[in-house]
Amino acid sequence: KVFSRKGFHQVKVEEIAQEAEIGKGTIYDYFESKEDIYHQIFRLSSERYTSIFQEMQVQGTDLWDKIRLLSLKHIQFFQTHKDMATFVFEGQSRPLESLNEWLMEQKEQRQELVRKMMARAVEEGEIRKVDPELASQMVMGLIFSVFGGMIFMEGKVPDSETVDKMLDILKKGLIK
């Protein structure tokens, strides 16, 4: 909560201790520094978000159902973990340099799960033959940009009807 409200550089360890209702010394029993706290929270947040993509692989009956579930879980994650989601959303724009490599690995892991889903849909004839890598980037970009933008920029929480409208446009394209 403190990092999401104030940003890394403005936060003092005392504020973290106060929010956690523990003594400042107790924090140093578990963490080496403010940066260590930031890293651990960032890792936990990113791992929880990535688990959505892993769950999606075993749920859903077809590609569209999986994308719908992924979208709804993405929205639910941002609603349920608003502070954590703000932290991750903001942090991904400006991560501490020491997290860059790990952050890219997490992003690639999520991207690979979606790429495999797209490749499977092509193989099974659910969708026409497309580049699974590009298609997965488009789906990920759409989910992040549209729903992330609605939540963080506009303060709106997309509902299942909004997800269905997005899927309809994605399925049918913009051709008249």
Image (cartoon, grey):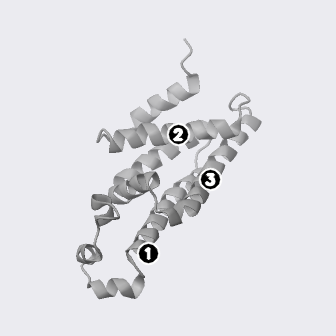
Q: Quadrant of residue 136?
A: top right
Q: Secondary structure at mark 3?
A: helix
Residue with the mark numbered 2: 141
The mark nearer the N terminus, 2 or 3, is 3
Circles 1 and 3, Cβ within 8 Å, touching? The answer is no
111 or 62, nearer to the observer? 111
Residue with the mark numbered 1: 36
Residue at point 44% right, 35% down? 163
Q: Secondary structure at mark 2?
A: helix
Residue at point 28% right, 72% down? 12
For mark 3, does the 10 Å Cα neighbourhood hold few (<14), some (14 to 19), or many (20 or more) residues?
A: few
Q: Quadrant of residue 28?
A: bottom left
Q: Amino acid at mark 3?
A: Glu
Residue with the mark numbered 3: 108
Q: Is residue 96 found left or right of 104 in the rendered image? A: left
- For the residues labelled 1 and 3, the Cα–Cα distance comes to 23 Å
Residue at point 57% right, 53% down? 107
Residue at point 32% right, 87% down? 26
**x%, y% of residue 6?**
28, 60
**Of the residues tagged 1 and 2, which is closer to the observer?**
1
Q: Amino acid at mark 1?
A: Asp
**x%, y% of residue 131?**
71, 34
Count of all numbered marks drawn on residues in the image: 3
- For the residues labelled 2 and 3, the Cα–Cα distance comes to 13 Å
The mark nearer the N terminus, 1 or 3, is 1
